[in-house]
Amino acid sequence: MASLPSKKSRNEKSPKKRGEKRNKEALTLDEVRKLGNELLSSRAHLNNLPLLLSLLSPSPRSLDAALEAMISLQSFFLPLLSEMKSTGDDQDPETVFKTWLKERFNEFTGLLVEVAVSSETDEALKEVVLDALMDFVKLGKNGSFQYEMYHNLIKSVVHSASPIDDVLNLLQSKFFKYADVCYFTYTSMEKITKFIDTKATEPDMSSSDNEEQWKVKNEAAIRNAYSVLSGVPPLDLSPEANYEMWSEHGISSKEGKASTKPSTSVITKKLKLRFTKAWLSFLKLPLPLDVYKEVLATLHQNVIPCMSNPAILCDFLTRSYDIGGVISVMALSGLFILMTQHGLAYPKFYEKLYTLLTPSVFLAKHRAVFFQLLDSCLKSSYLPAYLAAAFAKKLSRLALSVPPSGALMIIALTHNLLRRHPSINFLVHWKEEENKTADGSGEGNESNDDGKETAYKPVNHKKRSGIDPFNNEEKDPAKSNAMRSSLWDIDSLRHHHTPAVSRFVASLENDLTVKAKTTEMKVSDFSSGSYATVFNDEIRRRIKQVPLAFYRTTPTSLFSESDFPGWTFWSQPDENKTENGVEMNSIAEEIDQTNVKRQRVEA
């Protein structure tokens, strides 16, 4: 039977007080090393254990002493992990010893977590401490992943009031490459995020100050939670994926389970399930606006492909899509994937997409992705004619108020719409003969030039300038009267102040006439345009130089007498004034004799 520590060593207060007192005296490195060696050599020196524990702190007096104390404690506890189970009679000396040892071990791991998360910890000490903590996670419970200890670490990281970049970078570079570490990270995040937005854990929320403090802490925890989730690398979903485990039993934290390694498909399935639950729990939180935007911007690339059932994100994405503004624009990517790849039905999708077409969207940060998705959404040949006409007319009206780069984008989108949907080509080529309304009814009857009443005749802008039945303020594309209008807005771009726009719109008509020889335009070539790109493209153009005016003889003066009859353009010099020994009179005579009249012919 192992010998018990003395009464003084069992008395927690005495060695702790003595350790704190001696720690204040700033132990030297040799003294700390001696204490560690004595602790490792015999249980008779168990009183050194609390003293060594007192040397660990985020900002120790001596970094070398703290490192030496941590290494000695790690070497002491690692062989005893399997002996810390306190089973048996509470009065049994061995059980009492194991209980005391377990308490000291919990104190040690708690100090490791505190030092690892603190922003005051030296980078070298933080790395060594995190390695020691993960060694206990790896070797605890006879080779099974020590989930409780790792959960405390992740929880401290999420609820940390100081920056977590250092510890998160260490986790990413050293441990997130292991499948079981990622698995239990998702497991912890699912539990942690469920209690972030609750006031039940706060002691007193009655005062406004406590309410404000809670909001600040809550928002910081949400940001940290997103940093942890986004810091875990994407899952390897390929069939040839080779999952590397940190602990012996991998993703199983139960003792006594068979050590046979599960197949790749089973591991992938479990990882995707935990990944899905963790993200769903996080997306239910009241995300800050900047985090909300960042999540929407990366959701379609980093989250949806790795989920076990992506369709469960439909509530989050449709709710985001209904908010409007830039949030709707950023939610479009994820929503489009759910609709095209996972069978999501959204009846009012095109109505909402129609309302997103505002001048501000041409200045949005993620406008490139939005316009590419807009082009993809309008590609289907089953799109009703009234809907295609509404989008074409809405875009053409926006061309009058957007930057030149936006006008180029609109011309490209309109070109593709007219090619894909020949039924709306009448918006370009209005005929003078009688036409019926889009719905075939006789509404809008008016008299022809010969006085006979005919069916509705499309507006002739040459005769009735300023009359356009299109309602630009209408949010429902079916009620916008786009089928009764025309694309005069696009035609007006022929006189745009930017040469690139006027040239591009002039080529639109030619492309439509030879449709069989042309292809659709790549929206990606125009989606990232700006004033800078338009300007740079213009100054790089090779322009053929043409003469604007020429002279029959080389001009010798700025003006000629023929330009201003009655005037002579030379000065009368003083009679006796000379310059450099030459009389000015002789110079004047010379000028008068050599003055040749010139004729300027306008080119």
Image: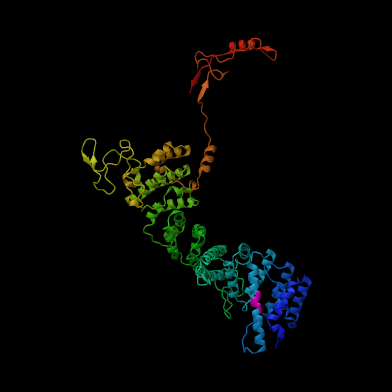
Q: Is residue 392 left or right of residue 120?
A: left
Examine the image and state in which quarter residue 539 appears: top right
Magenta span: helix, strand or loop, mainly? Answer: helix
Residue 535: x and y, percent? 52, 40
Residue displayed at 66% across by 78% down:
104
- In this rendering, the answer to whether 561 lies above or below 185 is above
Examine the image and state in which quarter residue 46 appears: bottom right
- In this rendering, the answer to whether 308 lies above or below 11 is above
Residue 205: x and y, percent? 51, 69
Residue displayed at 61% across by 78% down:
141
Number of numbered discs visible in the structure rendering: 0
Nearer the observer, 233 or 114: 114
Residue 394 is covered by the magenta coloring: no
Residue 355: x and y, percent? 39, 52
Q: Is residue 336 left or right of residue 121?
A: left
Residue displayed at 50% across by 72% down:
200
Nearer the observer, 153 or 408: 153
Q: Tell me where the magenta segment starts and ends, as one range.
A: 104-108
Q: Is residue 415 left or right of residue 16?
A: left
Image colouring: rainbow
Residue 364 appears in the rendering: yes
Quarter of the figure with the N terminus: bottom right
Residue displayed at 33% across by 51% down:
478
